[in-house]
Amino acid sequence: MKKICTWAIWAYSVWVFIFLTDTMDCVNLVEMLQRYLKDRRYLIVLDDVWSRDSWSLLDSSFVKNSNGSRIVITTRIQAVASLADGNREIKLNLLPKEEAWTLFCHKAFARLDGRSCPLSLKACAERIVDKCQGLPLALVALGSLLSYKEMDEHEWELFYSQLRWQLSNNPELSWVASVLNLSYNDLPSNLKNCFLYCGMFPEDYHIERKRLIRLWIAEGFIEDRGPEITLSDVAACYLKELADRSLLQVVDKNEYGRPKRFQMHDLVRELSLTISKKEKFATTWDHPNSDCSSDRSRRLSLHKDSNLMQTVTNSAQLRSVIVFVEGVSSSWFKNCYPSFRLLRVLSLRHCYIQKIPGNLSNLFNLHYLDLGYTKLKEVPRSIGKLSNLQTLYLKGSVMELPSAVTILTKLQHLIIDVGRFGSSASNKICHLEHLQVLKNIANSCMVRNLGCLTRMRSLGIRKVLESYNTDLWISVSKMSALTSLSVLVADRNRDALDMSDLKPLPYLEKLMLSGKLDKGAIPLVFGHFPKLKSLRLCFSGLREDPLSLLSAMFQNLGHLNLYRCYVGTRFAFRAGWFPMLKHLYLSSMGELKEVEIEDGTMRSLHRLELWGLKSLTSVPEGLVHLKALQQLCIGSMMPDEFKTRLAGRDRWIVEHIPYI
């Protein structure tokens, strides 16, 4: 009874506190609350906090009386969650499928014995649960609503087919939409368009970070914050904020922990589609009966491939078209051209396009063109008319580029598989002064002219001959903003990489070199890459154990990939080396017989991969010291004796590793 009275008094006091907020100033309210809490042991829950700023006032209001009191804050904003000490922050994950099913059945079939799903409804119920993707809020809401419906398969199928409408219009689900809408309404204005844009990707689609950033930039969504920071960096900040607000989920990270792919929760995506349609931001054609011929949306996303012609008829207001179906041909584009004249974005990745339509070159406003993984045989000279083009994505399609590409002076991103420029085009590469990304280029004439591209951030060059060394490294030295560099020699038995002419690269984060290193040694310039986080060396011909030098040079290294790069018999990882290393990959070093691992080395290592080490027959005992190791991957080309010992007498060495 005493506890009930205490809580009743507390509830009444809270009601008085709220009532008085209109009549008392903050100072008096704080004093009143402190007097009440002074000698009490209290538990206070601050639910769904949106701002860090509000905490400074609230924190000063609560009495620190050493009575074991606690404050619990719930939030959907990562910046608010970071107010807690590191060991007191609890991130609630989505429910696994089995638990999600149990929760849904508990609500949806509450009137049935055992609360079990009837067999006739199981298929539809499973699809509804899948749509919730483990979100308890949605599982409870949909389950409770369906519990009042007849246990009829047709009625449930009808409900599922109208789920988007139900979320927006059914009063019993309005609170779900309200909770999700709060997240959208709280977004700064510059993030709202970026959020809605993510909904244009198909359901459960893994959205590539780089692709999304380039699309946002092409659309003009990213604010210019001055010459000190690029639009790509600003866009990356936008992405991080959407993820921190739980509106996007990170599904994959790169080798040094940066998000690589994102996904939208199905119900969050439904919210974005509803808002997009209402505001005419975008139309998503995601089922065969979609009809947007009367829609005046400025963007169009096509997910299904029937009746495409009708979809884009009389749509002169269109600014973006993104296609996710293969059954689109050049003739489709030709027929739709009247609606495309003002496009800023055209993405036809994976479409069945064999030839670029001639009228594509008339899209004077085009900023982003994606023709990757199509059936293209060549790029016509007329592409030079696209004077506003910023991104040209041709990976997986053509192999040779016309000289007209060098007329595209606003081009920032050029991505191909192994591209060749003619000699005249190579001499004009300097015209592309805004170029930031140039991947998979193979051309001798171009190397000496690359130094003009001083804004380059990501460069990939293939088929490098030994005779290119001086010109190549002098050119690369002029790219002071370079963050990613990949160089592959033409013939790994004949051509060596002599990096003596390379100057320091202060912002380089990722380096991949494939080919013999001069004199079989680590280049001294490696010591002038202070921000390097990822290093991959292939076919380097190193004669001495490189680990001592690499550890001393790269204290921030998070990813190390050594592939057929060392001809010695022994590796030694000493205490204190590679403190930030998360992923180590050792492969195809046939002479390597021993790997020594001291206690205190690689304290952050999460994943270790061993592949094709044909002479390594014993399990390194030092693995027992790698306390943070979560995954040990043993490739199929490892010796049978190694595998036998790992499964038998040496099993004790790896018992602490969760996944092997």
Image: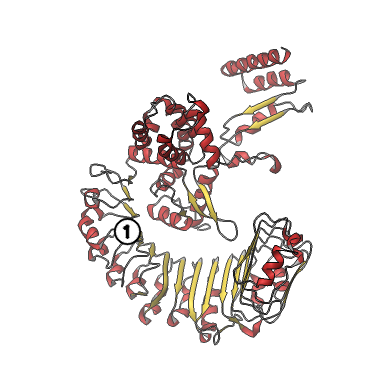
Q: Is residue 508 visible?
A: no
Would you say 74 lies left or right of 181 here? Answer: right
Give above or below for 454 relative to 153: below
Residue ID at (34%, 75%) = 403
Would you say 235 lies left or right of 632 here? Answer: left
Q: In which quarter of the view is residue 605 placed?
A: bottom right
Query: What kind of colouring is applied to the model shown?
Result: secondary structure
Residue 620 in the image, given as x and y percentages of width and height: 74, 68
Q: Is residue 379 visible?
A: yes
Amino acid residing under circle 1: Glu
Task: Please tell me which residue lies in front, 343 or 153.
Answer: 153
Residue ID at (49%, 36%) = 183
Q: In which quarter of the view is residue 326 placed?
A: bottom left
Would you say 590 lies left or right of 98 here? Answer: right
Would you say 438 lies left or right of 58 here? Answer: left
Residue 114 in the image, given as x and y percentages of width and height: 52, 28
Q: Which residue is mark 1?
A: 326
**How many marks can you see?**
1
Residue 462 in the image, given as x and y percentages of width and height: 48, 77
Q: Quick one: quadrant of the N terminus?
A: top right
Residue 384 in the image, given as x and y percentages of width and height: 31, 69
Give above or below for 11 relative to 190: above
Task: Please tell me which residue lies in front, 580 or 426.
Answer: 580
Q: Secondary structure at mark 1?
A: loop
Q: Quick one: quadrant of the C terminus?
A: bottom right
Give above or below for 656 relative to 130: below
Residue ID at (46%, 44%) = 191
Q: Residues within 10 Å of mark 1 (few under 14, many from 20)?
A: some
Task: Please tell me which residue lies in front, 555 or 436.
Answer: 555
